[in-house]
Amino acid sequence: MELDRRAWVVQVMGLPVSVHLRGPEVRTDAVAERVERVFAELRGMDAVFSTYRPDSVLGRLGGALPDPATTADPVVREVVELCEAARVRTGGWFDARRLPLPGGGTGFDPSGLVKGWAVERAARHLADLPGHDLCLNAGGDVLLRTAPGRPAWRVGVEDPDRPERMLDVVERAHGAVATSGTARRGTHITDPRTGRPAEAVRSVTVVGPELLWADVYATAAVARGADALDWLATLDGYAALLVDVAGRVRATPNWPGSRPAGQTRAA
Amino acid sequence: MRRITIWLLSTVAALVLLFSYKTSTMGAGGETSAIASGSDGSAGSSWSGTDDSGTDGSGTGTTGSGPSSGGTSGDNGSGGPSSGSGTATGSVARTRWGPVQVKITVVNGKITDVSTVQVPDGNRRDQEINDYAVPILRQEALVAQSARIDTVSGATVTSDGYRESLQSAIDAAHLR
């Protein structure tokens, strides 16, 4: 018997966020109320972290790095600490400290980490729904959970040059699929070594257990450029697919889709 | 279940057509157009395997759908995951170098392999077909599969770009 499935879509953090649930109670008010809590939390985090809002905590700082020792808000402290951990884990290729700000100039902008972190955090409101499967897509970054015995979710990996087509399809029951790149908004990932937009890589998709880290690794790989695949292959528990500016498609050896490692685009 | 079987067969037919096109344009003077046999109704594709309902046993033959009925556009409208497994063998396509036939292997509703079961022999085209056309077939099979994905991972979709996105179509199918 086919499982009942229901979707909710809300625009939040400047992104379309889709929640899909499969399970027996997706039409109940109780489940709908849980989903609403997910969106409410994301709105709350946007009010704290958006660099586009002058009245947010980050907006008021105007690019200054919040001092973890004196910052009262525990979520701000957590994000500052995670940004530093991300900088270390990526060898400096993810660096939130000197990014171009929406209002001009450069400064601290944790947006590249906050999305994955906030989505993982908000998804906790749907954690204890036994017998229900979750597929949460926030602007192209996907978080997945599946109850025992259920089919995995099928995640299409978009072709950066032809968004209506898929480069590959991966089946995942749990974890994350995150893609960063220059396809949708033009070049918006900054190379921390030069301060200029990174342009050598069109897109990187990372599959792994945690959305926060899959997203951070994908962003760092785009900034890193041509040799990013070798670095991605060293990440324990994560696999990646990379499209370079010439249109070559390559994957790490542990990539779960149907593209063999190192395969280039046919035709 | 029937719908999925037909979907696969139409994909095979479309793949055979594509295959024919690519091979017929590979060499110099490719004026010979290849014709998939499905177009004249003389031969069909076959499907063997199991599926969700189990009503189609192994080895069940089905006459092929003509190329006109299928396509790789990925909007065949089949919904929900399929757990069908088995192989689908396409019609024999006549190319300028001889008959070509492909086979698609499906495991739990996912195309896991596309291979040639019959290629022209006696010349070096075999290798060329395998090196050149099979990767294309694999890619097209993936495109055809995109009709049955649950979600799309891509570079950041903004609110503006969402309306035209494949994700919005997937979402719309389940909003109620």
Image: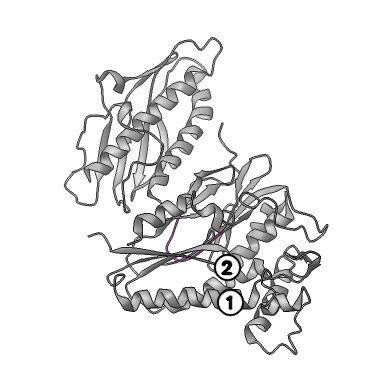
Find residue A45 and report its horizontal and vertical position in percent: 58, 76
Residue at the (61%, 51%) spot, across then down: A184
The correct choice, above or below, for A187 with respect to A147 in the image is above
Decide: is A29 above or below B118.
Answer: below
Q: What residue is disc 1 on?
A: A45
- Identity of the amino acid at label 2? Met
Q: Is residue A146 visible?
A: no
Tag 2, which chain?
A
Image coords of residue A201 (percent x, y) = 68, 48
Principal SS element in the magenta part?
Answer: strand
Q: CA distance from mark 2 to mark 1?
A: 8 Å
Residue A191 in which image quadrant: bottom right
Q: Earlier in the sequence, mark 2 or mark 1?
A: 2
| Chain at tag 1 | A
Q: Mark 1, residues whose alpha carbon is within 10 Å: few (<14), some, or many (≥20)?
A: many
Left or right for A254, reference B73 = right
